[in-house]
Image (cartoon, rainbow, N blue to C red):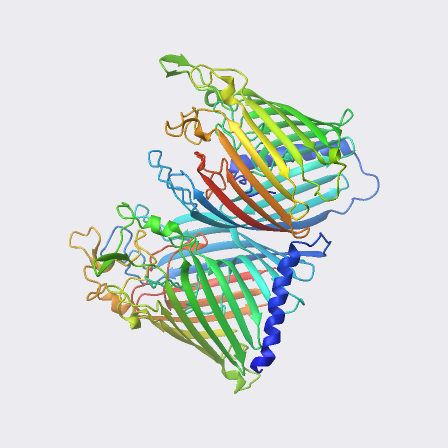
């Protein structure tokens, strides 16, 4: 479509949105048909850590305490969907959970039993104009969003990473974001999404992030590109949390002409992903719908260098690649993924709230903790900081009616589940450390 | 509807059993009252509804110590009252509602609310006809429909100490509620409530509220609460005497609370011009006595136990549904804390003194349609943070007059 042809469409969509907002303030109440449906979901995750050197909290020596450790997650969900009139849809998902997971503190050396319930997702979508998928839509709430395939184990970097430090979460962790996004298809093969999200998990909380995600699908290829202005609007809570003298939260600083500065935990994140479905070229009725897809994703977790911890941009670029193998409909999915991430530091969102990865993998001689990074410009976190650069995952899945059975083995960014979230520490530190997981999932 | 919503009840297993037993008793009463049905069984109608809410709040100025509105309430450091300026909070919450209507005049409603915490928001059985309405379970009850933020003292308060709340749309009470309209222009509410929010738990209170509306423009109301009339554990409701101020005094959390309120719509005096919205130009007030009896040392002056609120709906001319401006005076010399840890009244810090006696609130609402509404508020009120268990923190965040916050919420109801 030529630029001039596009302009009227852009203006029409913009006017639609603006008029809808203005009309809201003069609109009188009008009865709209409402339909409500309810589903119940059930999910059972059964995991076993086969090999992990991660020591319990407050211990530092390599340990085998997690070897052959079982983790169980049993989760039920109530999903309520509503359509109000032609333009509004709402979705509420409540959950109840029983969980046997890795003990969070050192005093409990057996499984930790926990449970709970609450809000899993809640979102509402307003579609401007005609109620079809081509119209712009505004979605607000707290919800899972993923631009990758639902079975992907690695990647999904856009909303599963931080900057300074550039931690990475694995995709098995449900990726909930809070805020909203505007979705526009222009032209029809190109979807633009503009997100305004609020940080509600990693301190400092309530910082606002602006993200653009563009996706194009054509001729069997799907291209995704995103730019995130992470923590663009930082609340005073952040600066308060990092105030000097706080006994809980230290500040890492570097000298810049004598002026004290702080690592910002904010920055620019770039993500690119491409997926190609080879069935566009190789057409066979024997192949399953997910067979022969190859995908690559890379990200830049912080465009700006900072002295000390973040002086090399190549250490902030995770790259992953995956392929789904021919399963010939015996299975619905079979795939392999690998990732390389050359960060020198431990992959944890924070350490007691400290905004930089101060801990190495090297135990202190007195065993009272890990050796701190003294000179981040020239040091790294120890030998494992290089060994943990490679991650891998293999997975299979079989769907029978509305029941899905999945099995995967991986050495990824595994973190023990905690309620519907996760514990902070990554537990698999080298490619030889791995776990397997079986999942039963159904909905009715 | 105002924000934030009332905390839902994170009931323990025993308390849930109590609620279910209570509901069963009410259902049995319904069955006896209804008697045999002639003909075949009526079909049960089940409807599902819900509500989503997104709220943004900023504590512009607060004395809440470590009062970050994180998911989990931090330990309040009583000696550390660093002011947290411009602290933000975003919250998404949702409520699922299931209504079962087995017969024409009976329905059961179950509500589950989740957001920062999670728990039952309502769980009640209702029987109603032209003469009365009887409900039992976890109730959503209000007697002052005009109060948007402040007020509702009779039930949403304690006695000895007389703590008060604000911003709670409903009082999450468990018990029985009977409403009748005996007498011209009169509405009577009789409630038997079980205390499940503030220690000591499980005490039973009896409440009577009467509302008199001789004309559409005028409503007068009065009520009495025999607070904790039937104690579950008398030693907790009335602890052993303590040495205070050099004398042995008895504390008790039982007491008699009184309430009076009025609501007057000025529009009929002006000829009810169509220029104004239905809520415009309403003046309302409420006062209460949180314990009529004096006790030495902490409760020796009845005037210190009388909160008074006044409200005015400023003309919004149908641009907004309402603009409610409210003010409250409450001369208690004690911290307005709920007794999570302490039974007794805690003297307020000297540098605050009586500066926390005055509260104010401006609340607005605009309904986009019958499903979507936008709410806004600016206030210095009795705001408390919500914790992960679905309850509220014991200490309020607004104390000095310079403390205030604002919030905006969008709700979708279906």
Residue sitting at 38 percent across and 50 percent down?
A236
Q: Is residue B18 left or right of residue A426?
A: right
Residue sitting at 33 percent across and 34 percent down?
B79
What residue occupies the far right of the structure in this picture? B39
Residue sitting at 41 percent across and 60 percent down?
A232
Q: Is residue A261 left or right of residue A3?
A: left
Question: Residue A37: horizontal and vertical position, in percent?
Answer: 66, 57
What residue occupies the far top of the structure in this picture? B247
Q: Is residue B343 above or below residue A159?
A: above
Question: Residue B389: horizontal and vertical position, in percent?
Answer: 47, 42
Q: Is residue B136 above or below residue A7?
A: above
**How many numbered markers are drawn?**
0
Q: Is residue B198 visible?
A: no
Question: Residue A145: horizontal and vertical position, in percent?
Answer: 50, 63
Question: Residue B375: horizontal and vertical position, in percent?
Answer: 58, 47
Classify residue A306 by image quadrant: bottom left
Q: Is residue A220 visible?
A: yes
Q: Nearer the viewer, residue B61 or A427?
A: B61
Location of the N terminus of chain B by quadrant is top right
Q: Is residue B123 left or right of residue B186?
A: left
């Amino acid at each position: 479509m030529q630029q001039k042809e596009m302009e009227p469409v852009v203006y029409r969509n913009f006017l639609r949105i603006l008029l809808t907002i203005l009309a809201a303030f003069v609109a009188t109440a009008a009865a709209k048909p409402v339909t409500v449906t309810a589903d119940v979901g059930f999910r059972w995750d059964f995991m076993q850590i086969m090999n992990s050197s991660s020591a319990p909290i407050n211990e530092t020596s390599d340990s085998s305490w997690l070897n052959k450790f079982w983790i169980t997650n049993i989760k039920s969900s109530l999903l309520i969907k509503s359509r109000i009139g032609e333009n509004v849809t709402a979705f509420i998902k409540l959950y109840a959970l029983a969980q046997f997971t890795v003990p969070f503190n050192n005093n409990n050396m057996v499984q930790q039993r926990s449970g709970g319930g609450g809000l899993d997702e809640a979102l509402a979508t307003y579609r401007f104009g005609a109620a079809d998928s081509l119209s712009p839509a505004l979605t607000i709430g707290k919800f899972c969003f993923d631009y990758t395939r639902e079975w992907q184990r690695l990647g999904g970097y856009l909303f599963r990473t931080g900057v300074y430090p550039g931690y990475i979460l694995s995709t098995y962790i449900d990726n909930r974001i809070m805020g909203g996004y505007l979705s526009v298809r222009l032209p029809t093969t190109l979807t633009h999404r503009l997100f305004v999200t609020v940080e509600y998990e990693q301190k400092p909380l309530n910082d606002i992030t602006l993200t653009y995600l563009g996706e194009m699908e054509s001729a069997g290829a799907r291209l995704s590109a995103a730019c995130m202005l992470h923590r663009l609007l930082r609340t005073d809570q952040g600066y308060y949390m990092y105030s000097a003298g706080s006994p809980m939260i230290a500040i890492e600083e570097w000298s810049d002409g004598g002026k004290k500065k702080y690592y910002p935990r904010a920055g620019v994140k770039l993500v690119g992903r491409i997926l190609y479905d080879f069935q566009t070229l190789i057409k066979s009725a024997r192949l399953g719908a997910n067979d022969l897809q190859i995908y690559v994703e890379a990200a830049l977790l912080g465009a700006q260098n900072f002295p000390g911890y973040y002086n090399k941009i190549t250490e902030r670029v995770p790259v992953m690649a995956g392929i789904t193998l021919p399963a010939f409909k015996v299975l619905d999915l079979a795939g392999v993924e690998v990732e390389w991430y050359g960060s020198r530091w431990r992959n944890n969102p924070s350490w007691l709230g400290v905004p930089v990865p101060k801990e190495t993998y090297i135990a202190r001689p007195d065993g009272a903790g890990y050796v701190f990074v003294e000179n981040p410009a020239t040091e790294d976190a120890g030998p494992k900081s290089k060994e943990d650069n490679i991650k891998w995952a293999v997975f299979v899945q079989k769907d029978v009616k509305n029941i899905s059975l999945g099995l995967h083995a991986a050495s990824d960014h595994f973190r023990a589940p905690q309620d519907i979230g996760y514990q902070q520490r990554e537990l698999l530190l080298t490619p030889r450390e791995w776990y397997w997981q079986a999942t039963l999932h159904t909905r009715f | 509807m105002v924000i934030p919503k009332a905390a839902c009840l994170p009931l323990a297993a025993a308390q849930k059993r109590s609620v279910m037993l209570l509901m069963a008793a009410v259902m049995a009463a319904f069955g006896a009252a209804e008697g045999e049905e002639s003909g075949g069984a009526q079909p049960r109608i089940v409807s599902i509804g819900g509500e989503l809410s997104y709220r943004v709040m900023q504590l512009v100025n607060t004395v809440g110590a470590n009062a970050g509105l994180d998911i989990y309430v931090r330990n309040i450091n009583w000696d550390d009252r660093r002011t947290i300026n411009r602290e933000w909070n975003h919250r998404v919450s949702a409520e699922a509602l299931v209504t079962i209507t087995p017969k024409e005049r009976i329905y059961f409603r179950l509500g589950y609310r989740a957001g920062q915490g999670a728990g039952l928001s309502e769980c009640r059985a209702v029987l109603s006809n032209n003469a009365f309405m009887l409900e039992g379970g976890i109730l959503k009850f209000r007697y002052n429909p005009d109060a948007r933020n402040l007020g509702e003292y009779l039930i949403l308060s304690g006695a000895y100490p007389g703590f008060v709340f604000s911003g709670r749309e409903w009082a999450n009470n468990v018990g029985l509620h009977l409403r009748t309209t005996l007498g011209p222009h009169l509405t009577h509410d009789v409630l038997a409530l079980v205390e499940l929010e503030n220690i000591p738990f499980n005490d039973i209170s009896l409440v009577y509220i009467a509302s008199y509306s001789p004309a559409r423009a005028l409503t007068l109301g009065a009520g009495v609460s025999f607070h904790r009339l039937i104690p579950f554990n008398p030693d907790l409701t009335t602890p052993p005497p303590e040495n205070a101020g050099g004398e042995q005094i008895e504390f008790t959390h039982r007491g008699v609370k009184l309430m009076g309120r009025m609501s007057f719509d000025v529009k009929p005096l002006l000829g009810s011009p169509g220029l104004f919205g239905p809520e415009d130009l309403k003046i309302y007030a409420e006062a209460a006595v949180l314990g009529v009896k004096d006790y030495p040392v902490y409760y020796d002056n009845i005037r210190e136990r009388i909160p008074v609120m006044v409200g005015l709906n400023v003309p919004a001319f149908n641009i907004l549904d309402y603009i409610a401006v409210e003010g409250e005076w409450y001369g208690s010399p004690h911290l307005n804390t709920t007794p999570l840890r302490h039974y007794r009244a805690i003297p307020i810090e000297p540098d605050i003194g009586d500066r926390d006696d005055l509260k104010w609130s401006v609340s607005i609402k605009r309904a986009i349609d019958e499903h979507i509404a936008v709410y806004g508020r600016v206030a210095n009120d009795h705001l408390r943070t919500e914790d992960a268990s679905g309850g509220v923190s014991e200490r309020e965040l607004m104390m000095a007059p310079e403390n205030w916050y604002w919030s905006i919420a969008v709700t979708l109801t279906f």
